[in-house]
Image: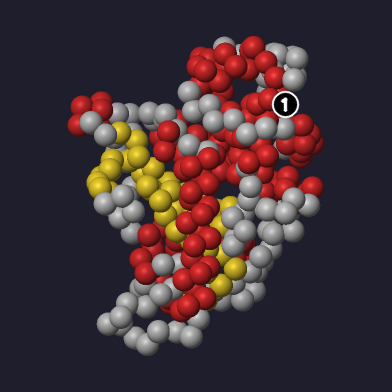
């Protein structure tokens, strides 16, 4: 957490506005948000109580829950900048192989909650094949390196085609692909489309994905692709299993967006720090989510 605070404080300078400066700086806010995600506090009220009880010596000022919630919901651009700054500070950033996949982000279950939700117009009904059930919420589309380092991501309605989201992500930041000549993207069968192939080929990007049995001849790299595809599943498992992505607690599009970004930032911070200290496993949060609580209490 100290390394993260120093990095954000040194590299993400925010412009000063008129009036009294906030008592909780942006670097302290990002550090608190990552600590909350890593330590497994998906309830903000419990996290603020824990911070006031055990972290008051580390932070000159700790806000109450309403102020922390307000600052966090408004910090989505800051969290995105922190993610990009950390990934660009690793040796994995210029990897010329990307993996893309999507995973459900459930936001409600009961019909009454759906009717009253502030996510109306953003979220929708989708089908989760992994759990064989329908859900109401959003879909997280994540593009990352084989090591799990996030490159770009987006939240979209589950009914929006995955191929359209991938094309939009590449078009939104064309410099990412331009900086990696010969870029290869690994995907699953949901990204099969001649139009997507033409779109990527025009930008010098190759797409490798499995073939349907009744479509074309399997590629020689089919067996290798099945092995590599497990990497993105493990990344999603890290977000859901260790960082409680499905328990984000957001009730508005701003709340869901920043809480998803908060989890991605926590995973990015772990990868960044593990590469810096030479840890044997790049994407491992065990040293932080199990031992961090006792260290903080000491």
- Look at the image and tell me whether residue 261 can be seen: no
Horizontal side, residue 196 vs residue 46: left or right:
left
Q: Locate the C terminus by quadrant.
A: top right
Quick one: 297 or 21, which is closer to the camera? 297
Q: Residue at the location (42% across, 33% down)?
A: 247
Q: Locate the N terminus by quadrant.
A: top right
Q: Residue at the location (27% across, 82% down)?
A: 214
Residue labelled with disc 1: 295
Few, some or many residues within 10 Å of mark 1 (<14, 14–19, 20+): few
Q: How many numbered markers are drawn?
A: 1
Quick one: 193 or 189, which is closer to the camera? 189
- 153 vs 260: above or below: below
- 183 vs 141: above or below: below
Q: Residue at the location (63% across, 69% down)?
A: 96
Residue 31 percent across, percent down from the top left? 67, 30
Going by the picture, which residue comes out furthest to the left? 111
- Look at the image and tell me whether residue 158 can be seen: yes
Horizontal side, residue 10 vs residue 213: left or right:
right
> Toward which corner of the image does residue 5 lie, by quadrant?
top right
Residue 277 percent across, percent down from the top left? 79, 47
Residue 8 percent across, percent down from the top left? 73, 36
> Toward which corner of the image does residue 102 lie, by quadrant?
bottom left
Horizontal side, residue 21 vs residue 70: left or right:
right
Going by the picture, which residue comes out furthest to the bottom? 217
Q: Residue at the location (59% across, 72% down)?
A: 183
Quick one: 236 or 187, which is closer to the camera? 236
Horizontal side, residue 148 vs residue 116: left or right:
right
Residue 55 percent across, percent down from the top left? 69, 17
Task: Indicate the secondary structure of the residue bearing disc 1.
Answer: helix
């Amino acid at each position: 957490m100290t390394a993260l605070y120093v990095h954000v404080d040194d590299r993400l300078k925010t412009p000063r506005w008129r009036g009294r400066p906030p008592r909780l700086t942006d670097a302290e806010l990002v550090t608190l948000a990552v600590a909350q995600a890593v330590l497994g506090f998906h309830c903000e009220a419990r996290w603020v109580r824990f911070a006031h009880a055990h972290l008051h010596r580390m932070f000159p000022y700790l806000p109450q829950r309403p102020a922390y919630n307000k600052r966090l919901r408004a910090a989505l651009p800051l969290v995105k900048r922190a993610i990009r700054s950390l990934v660009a500070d690793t040796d994995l950033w210029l990897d010329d192989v990307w993996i893309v996949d999507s995973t459900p982000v459930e936001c409600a279950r009961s019909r009454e909650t759906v009717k009253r939700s502030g996510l109306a117009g953003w979220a929708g009904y989708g089908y989760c094949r992994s759990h064989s059930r329908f859900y109401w919420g959003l879909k997280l589309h994540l593009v990352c390196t084989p090591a799990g380092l996030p490159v770009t991501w987006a939240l979209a309605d589950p009914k929006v085609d995955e191929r359209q989201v991938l094309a939009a992500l590449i078009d939104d930041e064309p410099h990412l692909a331009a900086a990696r000549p010969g870029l290869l993207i690994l995907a699953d069968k949901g990204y099969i489309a001649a139009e997507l192939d033409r779109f990527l080929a025009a930008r010098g990007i190759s797409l490798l994905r499995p073939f349907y049995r009744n479509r074309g001849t399997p590629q020689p790299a089919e067996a290798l692709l099945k092995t590599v595809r497990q990497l993105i599943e493990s990344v999603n498992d890290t977000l859901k299993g260790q960082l409680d992505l499905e328990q984000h607690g957001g009730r508005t599009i701003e709340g869901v967006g920043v809480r998803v970004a908060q989890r991605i930032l926590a995973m990015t911070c772990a990868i960044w720090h593990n590469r810096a200290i030479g840890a044997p496993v790049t994407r491992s949060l065990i040293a932080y989510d199990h031992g961090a609580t006792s260290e903080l209490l000491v």
